[in-house]
Image: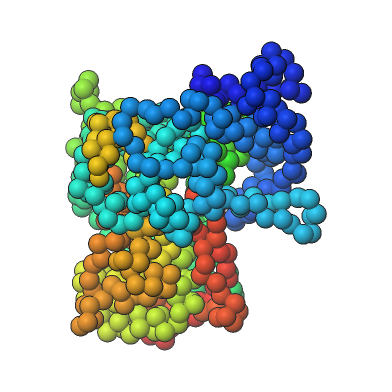
Amino acid sequence: MRAGTGLCWAAFSAGGEGAAAQQTSLSQRSLRETWGHWRPLEWEWEWEWEGVSKKSFPPAPARWAQPLAALFLGQHFSPAASLSSAGLFPAGPSSLVSFLGWWDLGGRLSPRTAKGSQYRWWGLQTTPGLSWQMGKEYGPVFTVFLGLQRVVVLCGYQAVKEALVDQAEEFSGRGQLPAFSKDFNHHGIVFANGQRWQQLRRFSLTTLRNFGMGKRSIEERIQEEAQCLVEELRKAEGTPFDPTFLLSRAVSNVICSIVFGNRFEYSDEKFLRLNKLITERFCIASSTEAALYNIFPEIMEKIPGAHHAGHRCSQQIIGFIKERIQVQQASLDPCAPQNYIDCFLAKMEKHNPDSEFCMENLVMATFNLFFAGTETISTTLRFGFLILMKHPQVQEKLHKEIDRVIGAGRWPSADDRRQMPYMEAVLHEIQRFSDILPMSLPHALTRDTHFRGYAIPKGTYVYPLLSTVHYDAEHHASPEQFEPRRFLDSHGRFKTADAFMPFSAGKRLCLGEGLARMELFLFLTTILQAFTLTSPVPLGEVSIVPDASGVSRVPMRYQLLVVPRQA
């Protein structure tokens, strides 16, 4: 155990008594005196999302703030904290300042006047402005401590691009997150490394790319689901509604169609249960408790809270997936696979001992597809609806382009994208502006690496801050403004932007990027072909500022009116 950790436990051991608490060093006595006056706050956990309420999770006692803070003080006062490890790391703040600065990238306590001494914790969120504060002081590449772990942070387009693209091989490893370790245990695609990751990623990319197999292509499945969504929206009949859960069901059904070979009715009880679990798991993964668990796994493992509910939630999703796999195994024709699971099972039938095609990897790869392919896309669509509601002039231009290119007599198709530069520009700007995943999952160096003059050891975790790419003022003028024209040239033609990485970049680029782009285009175009999106409240009251929801950015909850367009 490092000295800092030992000091931490001495600092909050029962009553400051016992052998550990009786150490005589000045730093330990100072810690004991400091934390002897600690008064735990009362905490109230409060959010609700379509019946998914954080109040349903086990409450996290305020007492955990004391040991966690003491751990950092212990580490800060410990000589071990100041010792250099192997390698030449970028500059960065001390371990204590590092933690507090990182924590302040969105995490904050807000007094609740109605409750007197009670506080609400708003969670960790990496925001562009605060991220740049450390970047301006220490440069676009700097080091921070997350718990006892030294990690490297990348800020701005140039640094992120040089790492993930120019030195893609070195930065292609995946760091592990304890909040997901129980779920995946290195299986599946997202948290795998080495041959397992390479085999499963290659298989999944090929399967999704060649999904002309069976009776319908992926595009046809999305088109069908988009029409089902339009019919559901018609049922609103001029009544304001929250589109959150409806969009989640539509996007989830696309994954179901690809993975299982069939879609579900929106009222199907098992399907509703699956979507509630996915939403719940996403919320827990984005929570402050999960962020703390990733930093202090050994401590948080012993403390009750929502982070424990995450694994239980995952087990229910996994149970649903296993049940469907068993059904498909019974009717499998290896020569005529109809969906993703069939293709994987056909690979398993070959009984190759060196292959990574086993049941555990099938279950976890399917889980990866659901988790990555549902909430991110539905949240982007929800952001898009809100932004278009706030900017009716943008929506009007989109309607004109849809009427000119597609009309009302046929469904939108993926081929229409090439003739719809304004729609492409709007979709790109929605993704850039909403920036729903401000920080990439951790990368891990696959070998000792020289980067920008630093010598960083193999295995070091690297966090690219994607917010600082999308809000990089050197590449995006007035980045805080929603402006689709930044993706159009002087002739109104669509133009790409280098500083655009909603799916990350390099070898860990999201494997579902192509699917996601097609879904966003077909869903939004189909809906705008049929409806005008309006607000039931004055536009001045509509906010497109994202809500702080853990490490993700989500739109504030809102009500929407859909008005049918004249054919």
**Placement of 140 over or under 64, stated as above or below:** below
- Residue 222 visible: no
Q: Position of residue 45 (x, y in %)?
A: 68, 48
Q: Residue at x 34, y 51 (%)?
A: 140
**Which quadrant: the C terminus?**
bottom left
Which of the 4 image quadrants contains residue 359? top left
Work out whether residue 505 can be spotted.
yes
Relative height, residue 309 to residue 265 (above, below): above
Model colouring: rainbow
Quarter residue 559 falls in = bottom right
Q: Give the image quarter of residue 424.
A: bottom left
> In the displayed image of the protein, which residue is found farthest to the top?
19
Residue 213 is situated, as x and y percent measured from the top left of the image, at 21, 49
In the image, taking residue 567 as reference, residue 542 lies left or right, namely right
Taking 323 as reference, is 416 left or right? Answer: left
Residue sticking out furthest to the front: 26
> In the picture shown, does residue 146 fall above or below 32?
below
386 vs 343, nearest the viewer: 386
Q: Residue at x 74, y 36 (%)?
A: 38
Left/right of residue 374 with respect to residue 340 in the rendered view: right
| Nearer the observer, 476 or 433 | 476
Q: Position of residue 43 (x, y in %)?
A: 72, 45
Q: Position of residue 541 (x, y in %)?
A: 59, 77
Relative vertical location of residue 375 with respect to residue 178 in this rendering, above or below: below
Please tell me how many numbered marks the rendered image carries: 0
Residue at 62% in and 36% down: 69
Drawn side of residue 475 relative to residue 184, left or right: left
Name the foreground residue: 268 vs 16.
16
Residue name at image x 43 percent, y 63 percent = 434
